Image (cartoon, grey):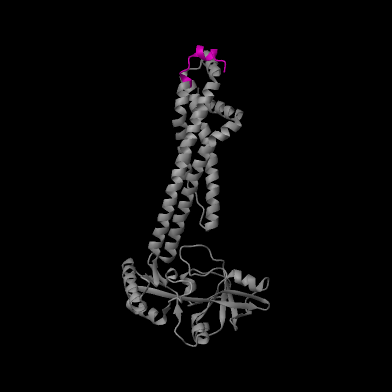
Amino acid sequence: MNITEGLRQSLEVIRGNKVRSFLTMLGINFGVGCLIAISVVGLAFRDSVNSEMGRYGSTLLWVQTNWRAYASYEPRTYMSERDKTYFESALPGMISIESIFDANYTVSYKGNTTQTTVMGVEPAHFDMFSVNMEQGRLFMDDDIQNKRAVCILRPDIAATLFEDEDPLGKMVTINDRNFKVIGITERMGQGFISDGSDNNTIFVSQDYVATRIWDGRDIKYWFLIMKFDVLDNVNLAQERITHYLNTKYGKLRGEERFQIERLDTYVGMVDKILNIISVLVLVIAVISIVVGGLGIMNIMLVAVTERTREIGIRMAIGATSRDILVQFVIESIALCLIGGGTGIIFGATLAAVACAILEWKFMISLSIVLGALFISTSIGLIFGIYPSYKASKLMPIEALRSEV
């Protein structure tokens, strides 16, 4: 018997027992689907990490108020302009430093009023965090030098305040002060580095807030992000910043008032979590595939029993034991390949949904698909060989006497 003829007969048997074949393939389908999903999501994650690393480099370090150290009623400790100046002079290899402060304010335009986050940033902020504009422009040096009351809106707050009206050039009231809208940003995506804003944030100039709203008082920062030339200087900066802040501000009930994060450490932590999840999903997938394989073996044994007379007739008219063995092995592999094929579609769909939610690039490599098909074929061969061997060893006379 050639493989083509064996495959044709196997597909006829599968079509003749649709419900049983479907239930038999479920385990393989689910297991392969899990493998595909976790492989594709893992691939997308690593692509996203590489993209972030390419955008920011691996030498980013940020310092922020440690919110976990404070009870709800306690005032938070923030960094000052003096702290920022000290870091600029005391930390070798620093390429740039970006400061952020924010507060919740009442914002209104005509009859629309809402509470939202207003964030004071420096002009370099938008380049540092790759903020792109949908409309209008960014802050210019002229805005900073002349202390102009201008602001940039995220898309959701623009829609809330202006609805269908064009916001550019309009005046919004922020905490009883009027600001001219000069730009609308693109909707922000998800990434490992965030400036703490969301799509309801309003950006204003730090210099304007410091001189016109805070009357020149020392600005308080909850977040500083720094970029260094090499990784060794990141390590040195982490040690010096920790010592400086603990010496100046002390600890709160034994816990540090500020936390220091690094891009390389953060990505490593996220990667470790994904690896743990991957292992758990892999275990579930392997168990599911093995259970599916046992189901294949069981249903093939049942098929051998049900088709004993058919096997006897085929042997009586010239089929060899090898023909019977090949027939049942092909049938087992066909079941697993169909289950694996639908599992690939199922897993790819799950991965596509996950990537869409996480805003990662969906990609599926040929090696992943071929690997899934190889696993399916192997399961069909491993768990189908015993029933096939049993069928091939039936004696023609005894098989013909079967009443099944």
Is 391 above or below relative to 81?
A: above
Q: Is residue 89 above or below residue 335?
A: below
Residue span colored magenta: 391-404
Depth check: give the residue in front, 193 or 77.
77
Image spot of residue 294 (x, y percent): 48, 32
Can residue 349 be seen here? The reply is yes
Find residue 323 and report its horizontal and vertical position in percent: 49, 21
Query: Please, is residue 35 above or below residue 150 in the view?
Result: above
Figure disc tally: 0
Which residue is at a point 55% across and 72% down the rendered structure image? 201
Residue 397 is inside the magenta segment:
yes
Identify which residue is drawn at 63% across, 78% down.
108
Q: Is residue 231 left or right of residue 362?
A: left
Q: Is residue 42 left or right of residue 188?
A: left
State the residue lying farthest toward the bottom: 215
Q: Which residue appears at 52% of the width and 57% of the height?
A: 358
Q: At 54% from the left edge and 12% from the top edge, which residue is drawn?
A: 401
Q: Nearer the viewer, residue 230 or 252?
A: 252
Q: Position of residue 87 (x, y in %)?
A: 36, 77
Q: Is residue 94 above or below residue 298?
A: below
